[in-house]
Image (cartoon, rainbow, N blue to C red):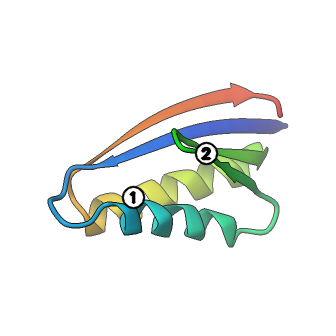
Amino acid sequence: MQISIEISLYPLAEQTYKSQIWDFIDNLKTVDGLNVVTNGMSTQVFGEYDLATTTVMAEIKKVHETLGAAVFVCKFIGGD
């Protein structure tokens, strides 16, 4: 089963936030089997359901472990 995930990341840290957002996106792009598309408002991740959801959740956890305060807005759409 395929899934599409749209993600917006809003770091609440005082330091530069753009590098944190790009690190999150770059980590997603390294995963074989995922198609990652970005625009000015969000990042879209397309791929096999288990791979995409597991990868996205692991990357969200990394951000919370390293940054602490960050807000994610996500949409999960069944299908590509």
The residue to which callout 1 is attached is 61
Q: In percent of the image, x 74 and y 43: which residue is there? A: 49
Which label is found at residue 20? none
Q: In percent of the image, x 71 and y 68: which residue is there? A: 31
Which element carries disc 1, helix, strand or loop? Answer: helix
Q: In percent of the image, x 21 and y 50: which residue is there? A: 12
Within 10 Å of disc 2 (Cα), the crowding (few <14, some 14-19, many 20+) is few
Q: Amino acid at mark 2?
A: Asn
Q: Which quarter of the rendered picture does the C terminus lie within? A: top right
Coordinates of residue 48 in the picture (x, y in percent): 80, 47
Q: Are marks 2 and 1 in contact (CB under 8 Å)?
A: no
Q: In percent of the image, x 50 and y 34: which residue is there? A: 74
Earlier sequence position, callout 2 versus callout 1: 2
Whether residue 77 sits left or right of residue 66 in the image: it is: right
Quarter where residue 27 is shown = bottom right
Which element carries disc 2, helix, strand or loop? Answer: loop
Q: Amino acid at mark 1?
A: Lys
Coordinates of residue 55 in the picture (x, y in percent): 60, 58
Q: How many marks?
A: 2
Q: Which quarter of the rendered picture does the N terminus lie within? A: top right
Coordinates of residue 29 in the picture (x, y in percent): 67, 66
Coordinates of residue 56 in the picture (x, y in percent): 56, 53
Nearest to the observer: residue 16 or residue 5: 16
The residue to which callout 2 is attached is 39
Q: Disc 2 versus disc 1: distance between alpha carbons? A: 22 Å
Nearest to the observer: residue 59 or residue 25: 25
Quarter where residue 32 is shown = bottom right
